């Protein structure tokens, strides 16, 4: 092989290597029912510090991805707060993740709808990417072992939560 | 004399200061060209989604607070992460966004220069080459007849 051919091959290999590295570094994403839910640490929306789904191991957790600019999120927020009020406790909690949103807007949203359940901030959308969300809102029910038991790509309402989520939770006030 | 010089210096400062401030003052239309709408995956300038609208309002507020372009971009990165910048920051793999086009341009320029040199060399060789042999015998007669017929 001539020097010229070697240089051409090396250049092509370098470009292919660069493309492969770019793809691999992006990583694959997404979670489905039965798989372990991602537990990336995230900053808390209020109060500082970080937290993650891992801190709720041993509890049922309804992970709710939302954003203040999202219309359907405004519709479902009161239903989620009521569900938390009815079922929240040592065995269950709703966990909000404010995704690709301004932190001030997120905090104002939580105040406006009186959201009392824990809220994390996912400004760059990394957690949403881990879960493979296609938008907001999206809801994932994670069991005490950390596995996704149910997911809904879209908003929930009170009836849906009572019919589809409540039966999966331990009986009585969780 | 000194007092006059000081007064002149002060007057110059007063004249130049607003210009310097105006130069530093950030503009929404300029920043929109340099940052992304993270949800849409397009330049903020081209986006009109609810998230993009909030981002534009946020930037306008920061401008009204007197923040510079660099400060606003830093705040946006703190809110949305590095990917909010249309041009990545110069570190790690992100650097490839800068050096790959430069290397590609240099390789293309060198290849073009070599190609032009070879082409010129080959055309010069072509000029120096002897003319093809003139037709002889029957071919020469036929050529003469054709030229005469067409009055060339």
Image: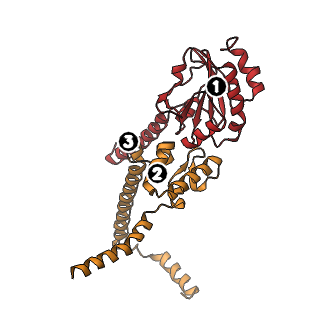
For the image, the number of numbered tags is 3
Q: Nearer the viewer, residue A51 or B150?
A: A51
Mark 1 vs 2: CB contact within 8 A: no
| Residue where numbered disc 2 is placed | B73
Mark in the foreground, 3 or 2:
2
| Residue where numbered disc 1 is placed | A140
Chain identifier matching the red colour in the rendered picture: A
Q: Is residue A171 above or below residue A130?
A: above
Image coords of residue A52 (percent x, y): 51, 25
| Residue where numbered disc 3 is placed | B92
- Rounded to the nearest angstrom, the CA distance separating label 1 from label 3 is 34 Å
State the residue at coordinates (54%, 61%). Answer: B29
- Circle 1 marks a residue in which chain? A
Image coords of residue B37 (percent x, y): 57, 48
Image coords of residue A146 (percent x, y): 57, 18
| Helix, strand or loop for disc 1 | strand
Q: Is residue B94 above or below residue A40?
A: below
Image coords of residue A51 (percent x, y): 50, 27
Quadrant location of the N terminus of chain B in the rendered image: bottom left
| Helix, strand or loop for disc 2 | helix
- Circle 2 marks a residue in which chain? B
Mark number displayed over residue A37:
none
Q: Nearer the viewer, residue A107 or A147?
A: A107
Chain identifier matching the orange colour in the rendered picture: B
| Helix, strand or loop for disc 3 | helix
State the residue at coordinates (44%, 57%). Answer: B68
- Circle 3 marks a residue in which chain? B
């Amino acid at each position: 092989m001539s020097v010229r051919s070697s240089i051409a091959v090396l250049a092509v290999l370098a470009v292919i290597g660069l493309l492969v590295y770019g793809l691999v570094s992006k990583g694959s994403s997404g979670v489905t029912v039965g798989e372990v839910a991602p537990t990336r640490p995230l900053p808390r929306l209020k109060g500082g510090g970080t937290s993650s789904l891992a801190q709720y191991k041993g509890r049922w957790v309804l992970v709710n991805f939302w954003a203040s600019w999202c219309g359907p999120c405004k519709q479902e927020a009161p239903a989620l707060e009521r569900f938390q009020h009815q079922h929240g406790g040592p065995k269950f909690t709703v966990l909000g993740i404010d995704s690709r949103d301004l932190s001030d807007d997120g905090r104002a949203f939580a105040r406006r709808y009186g959201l009392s359940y824990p809220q994390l901030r996912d400004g760059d959308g990394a957690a949403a990417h881990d879960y493979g969300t296609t938008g907001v809102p999206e809801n994932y029910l994670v069991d005490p072992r950390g596995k996704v038991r149910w997911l809904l790509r879209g908003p929930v309402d009170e009836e849906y939560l009572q019919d589809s989520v409540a039966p999966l939770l331990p009986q009585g006030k969780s | 004399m000194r007092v006059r010089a000081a007064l002149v210096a002060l007057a110059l400062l007063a004249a130049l200061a607003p210009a310097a401030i105006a130069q530093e003052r950030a503009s929404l239309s300029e920043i929109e060209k340099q940052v992304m709408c993270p949800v849409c995956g397009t330049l903020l300038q081209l986006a009109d989604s609810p998230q993009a609208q909030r981002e534009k309002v946020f930037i306008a507020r920061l401008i009204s607070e007197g923040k510079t372009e660099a400060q606003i971009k830093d705040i946006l990165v703190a809110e949305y992460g590095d990917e909010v910048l249309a041009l990545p920051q110069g570190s790690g793999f992100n650097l490839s966004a800068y050096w790959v086009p430069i290397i590609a341009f240099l390789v293309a320029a060198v290849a073009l220069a070599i190609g032009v040199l070879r082409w010129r060399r080959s055309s010069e060789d072509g000029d120096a080459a002897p003319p093809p042999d003139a037709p002889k015998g029957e071919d020469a007669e036929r050529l003469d007849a054709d030229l005469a017929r067409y009055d060339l």
